Image (cartoon, coloured by chain):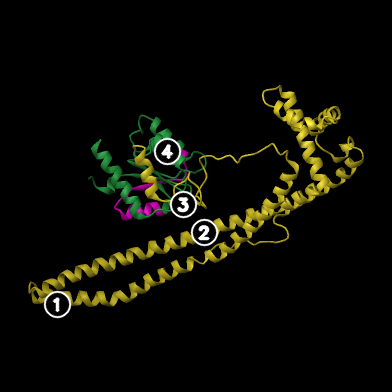
Chain colours: A green, B yellow
Amino acid sequence: MTDPSKIKFLVVDDFSTMRRIVRNLLKELGYTNAEEAEDGAVALQKLQAGTYDFVISDWNMPNMDGLQLLQAVRADPALKHLPVLMITAEAKKENIIAAAQSGASGYIVKPFTAGTLNDKLVKIFEKLGQA
Amino acid sequence: MAKPIKFDESCDNEDLQSLFDSIAAGSEVPLQAAKETPPAVDASGDSDDLQALFDSVSAQVGESDTASQEQPVKHAQVEGSEPGSVFSSLGQMTRELHDTLRELGHDKILGDAARTIPDARQRLSYIIQMTEQAASRALNAIDIAKPIQEEMQARSEALGARWGKVFANQLSADEFKLLATDTHAFLNAVPQQAEATNAQLTEIMMAQDFQDLTGQVVKKVIELVENLETQLLRVLIEAKPPELHVEAPEGMLNGPVINADGRSDVVTSQSQVDDLLESLGF
């Protein structure tokens, strides 16, 4: 696998506390290169302007929610290859299925642990490696 | 630390309070007047549009006064009929609700219920403020303590490795002297660093004091909501046609599941998420 500090993450959540926690967890796992966005609209702008390798997004956010962000990413030829991991408090089966059908790379329900985040990241990177 | 929001039990916000007062005062007088002479609502100072709507409804009601049993039929007509009848049906329902509320004295109850909402809102803002503060305090303390711990770990590991060489007889006398000096310096530094870490642990502990405060405020809000619910339910039960069964709209943005008991439409653990996705081939 490539150097984890070379992988550039975008952490999208409207609560700064949660962004901070996710970034800290990523840092502990060796992924030191991460930036933040406070909603889907800001995230999409950043994604279109910069070069990111991985998106971790909340669902329920103002302006543009996580599902809309996911759909916008998948609809953009320049971004559609990006892995998008959803970390959200939305725990209805309907939500999980909608996210999967829209092309989410993984789905984590809050509250979550560092172990879960690591598992999902490893799994997503494995799949990317195969592709 | 920011100052907690001060609660004023009697009035939450002067502007809102005066708005409520004016509405409460404004609604009582015309209600009295309306009791005797229904068309004389002009005295209330309503806007022209509302007045026009009310007038058209009054006319409509005049026609169908005898046929008030036709109500369900009227509601049914709303779908797919011309806009005019939608407005008149809506107006009629409003009028009925208005009358019922007045007869039962619920306008007062609703006023009281509405007055509690700014209070609840302020309390909820307080909770956001307190919890955010607590989270920042804890995370700041961790940011300070972690590098200290990491440095102590690295230095002790390095010294340990060098002492390993001493016992393996791989160190010269000069190297040993240097090791002794380094070890001494390290041991002198440890208590200070441990103390610094300890101070941050205490800070993290202290940051949890929000739980007590927010807990109390949450209880208060639950009380307010319960009151509001009871009052609104009473109004609804008495004012709503029985055949109108309203289902709460359920969307995709529900937030955390507060109580999963007896629900089959939600997952309660990450493993259930994984199983569901796997069962669908994702």
- Which residue carries the number 1 mark? B177
Of circles 1 and 2, the one toward us is: 2
Is B213 left or right of B155, judged from the image as shown? right
Query: For numbered disc 3, what is the local secondary structure?
Result: helix
Tell me how far mark 1 sits from mark 3, CA to CA.
51 Å
> What residue type is disc 2 on?
Thr
Query: For numbered disc 4, what is the local secondary structure?
Result: helix
> What residue type is disc 4 on?
Ile
> Which numbered disc, 1 or 2, marks the residue that appears first in the sequence?
2
Q: Which mark is residue A97?
A: 4
Of circles 4 and 3, the one toward us is: 4
Work out whether residue A25 or residue B243 is closer to the camera in this orientation and state it. B243
Tell me how far mark 1 sits from mark 2, CA to CA.
53 Å
Determine the residue positioned at 29% across, 52% down: A30
- Which residue carries the number 2 mark? B131
Chain under disc 1: B
Provide residue B222's location: percent of width, then percent of height: 62, 57
Query: For numbered disc 2, what is the local secondary structure?
Result: helix
Q: Which residues are magenta?
A: A21-46
Q: Which mark is residue A16?
A: 3
> What residue type is disc 3 on?
Ser
Provide residue B219's location: percent of width, then percent of height: 60, 61
> What residue type is disc 1 on?
Lys
Q: Is residue A26 magenta?
A: yes
Determine the residue positioned at 48% across, 50% down: A15
Tell me how far mark 4 sits from mark 1, CA to CA.
66 Å
Of circles 4 and 2, the one toward us is: 4
Of circles 4 and 1, the one toward us is: 4
